[in-house]
Amino acid sequence: MSDRSDELTTSRDPPSTEELLEETDRLLAGEGSSRPTDAADAERTASETEGGVETDVEPPDTDGEAGSRSRLRTAARRLSPTTQFSPRAALALALVLAVGLFVGGSVLPIAGHVLGLLAVAFVVGLVTAKRRYLEVGLAGGSVGAIGAFFDYAVTAFLVGGSGSRALAVGTAASLLAVLVGYYFGRDLRAGLTREI
């Protein structure tokens, strides 16, 4: 047997942070990567036709470059403002929570608003699959602030009291109620949908 210690294997160093950021900018801009693609990369992105239906087939990742590109794309999608906050969802939640505030206040004169918000947020957490804590918090806080303003602050300002304190307490109570209700709704959903 011969000793093969004289052969050197060369391995590519992982790209630096600056190279990764530049590549991410190119990918987000749609320019693609400036690195040459090899045959394995071409196979990964090629579509194969099977029975007239095109499917994207990706063989297992043999080099770390394609995996890092995929992770960069996924991270860029997660950090996109549209994936983190949805204005449409916030507006829809505000309208639904406003109905809960109104109905709760109509049914129970004392603490009905907060209980209405809690119940609606619980149902929203129970039926939605995507996490929307930011939207629920913003919608619940704004609806609670408006409700507290019309219930307590106008009276307090007219009579000459502490309207700002009533507004702050109403907003905080509403925000807490919607977040707690949404959390428990999501928790119950997770328990019901968990595979045994």
Image (cartoon, rainbow, N blue to C red):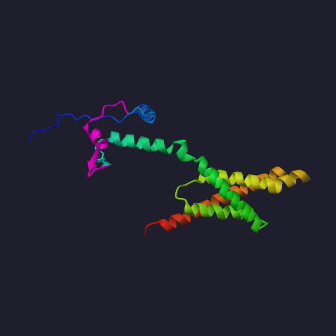
Q: Position of residue 88 (x, y in %)?
A: 60, 49
Q: Is residue 21 above or below residue 167?
A: above
Residue furthest right in the image: 159
Point out the stretch of residues depicted in magenta. 33-53
Which part of the image, by quadrant, shows the C terminus?
bottom left
Q: Position of residue 15 (x, y in %)?
A: 37, 34
Which part of the image, by quadrant, shows the N terminus?
top left
Instruction: Looking at the picture, tell me which residue is in the foreground, 7 or 152.
Output: 152
Q: Is residue 63 magenta?
A: no
Tell me if I can see residue 131 in this picture: yes
**Residue at 61% across / 60% down in the picture?**
182
Image-based side of 9 in relation to 158, left or right: left
Q: Is residue 46 magenta?
A: yes
Q: Position of residue 95 (x, y in %)?
A: 67, 55
Tell me if I can see residue 111 in this picture: no
Q: Is residue 49 above or below residue 184?
A: above
**Residue at 59% across / 53% down in the picture?**
133
The picture quadrant where one finds residue 186 is: bottom right
The picture quadrant where one finds residue 17 is: top left
Image-based side of 121 in relation to 160, left or right: left
**Residue at 45% across / 36% down in the picture?**
28
Residue furthest top in the image: 34
